Image (cartoon, helix red, strand yellow):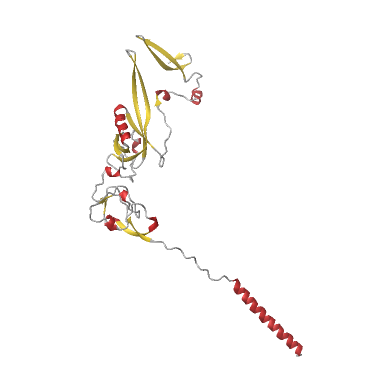
Amino acid sequence: MRPSSLIMLAVALVFGVSAALLAKFWLENQVPGPQIADAKPAVDMGTLVVATGPMRFGTRVTQAHLREVQWPQGAVPEGAFAKISDLVNGNGKRVVLSAIEENEPVLEWKITGPGQRASLSALIDKDKKAVAVRVDDVQGVAGFVLPGERVDVLLTRTRIEEIGDTLQSKSAFTDVLLENVRVLAIDQLADDRTEKPSVVKTVTIEVTTDQAQKLALAGSVGMLSLALRSAGSVNAQPSRRISLVDLGKRTATATRKSGRRDAGRTSVVVVTRAGARAEYSVVRYGSTVR
């Protein structure tokens, strides 16, 4: 082989090896290196007392009902207990006031203080009173009013006015007496997790002192009934007095459907007796007053 050919072959080998090394170096640089995970800040953990199973109103709290779990220190609910010994410490038994579910934190306001009874007075908020309202299957919304729900209280009464010496004018009307009051108990049941409706004779509601006075007076002058509010409804709703006149009002649509042109029209009749003058509103059909 001629010397020139050997030189050309050597040069080709050098370039080939150099190209291979350069290609290997380039490929290695394209592979991402190991990623270093961002260090997460450490979370301070503590303990929290939760229920081992469901507990209802009146249940006596014992160690068997409780257990301690790990809980972030910055997310501890207000009124929670860190240790079982803080809750069951031998100073007196505690009783459940508001239902507690399994794995739910046990909070101070859901149980009584040491040695206290699970009475209705423990459920009443500060500066509030408990007042019982007598109801039946209609006034009590067919038994569907349960502890923990919100109701409006309606007052229906009749007013009699003297007209002259011998005549009297009688009118009946209904007012919204109280709005958005909390039901504490039905009859002697105060468990706010009860789901079975039942017809009861009394409903105990939570009111202020002023509202309690209104209820006491209203019960002596008229009939009280309850209107169940939708769940979560807390806003005041516009209301007005409803009287017998409102019951006789008919819409234009209803008048057209009746098929009578004069249906729904009224006339005022004046009656004078023994010098006393009284006016009455009556419905007129055609040329006949009824």
Q: Nearer the viewer, residue 180 or 86?
A: 86
Q: Quadrant of residue 175?
A: top left
Residue sitting at x 38%, y 10%: 272
Q: Quadrant of residue 88?
A: bottom left
Percent coordinates x, y for residue 87 in the rendering: 28, 55
The C terminus lies in quadrant: top left
Percent position of residue 56, x then y = 30, 49
Q: Position of residue 254 (x, y in %)?
A: 48, 25
The answer to whether residue 223 is visible is yes
Quarter containing the N terminus: bottom right
Identify the residue at image location x=68%, y=81%: 16
Q: Viewer-proximal residue, 10 or 213? A: 213
Q: Residue at x 40, y 23 (%)?
A: 244
**Image vertical order of residue 40 relative to residue 177, above or below:** below
Q: Nearer the viewer, residue 50 or 127?
A: 127
Q: Quick check: 168 above or below 94?
A: above
Position of residue 83 in the picture relative to residue 241 (left or right): left
Total marks in image:
0
Q: Where is residue 180 drawn, in percent x and y?
A: 38, 37
Visible residue check, residue 200: no
80 vs 207: above or below: below
User: Picture quarter containing residue 103?
Assistant: bottom left
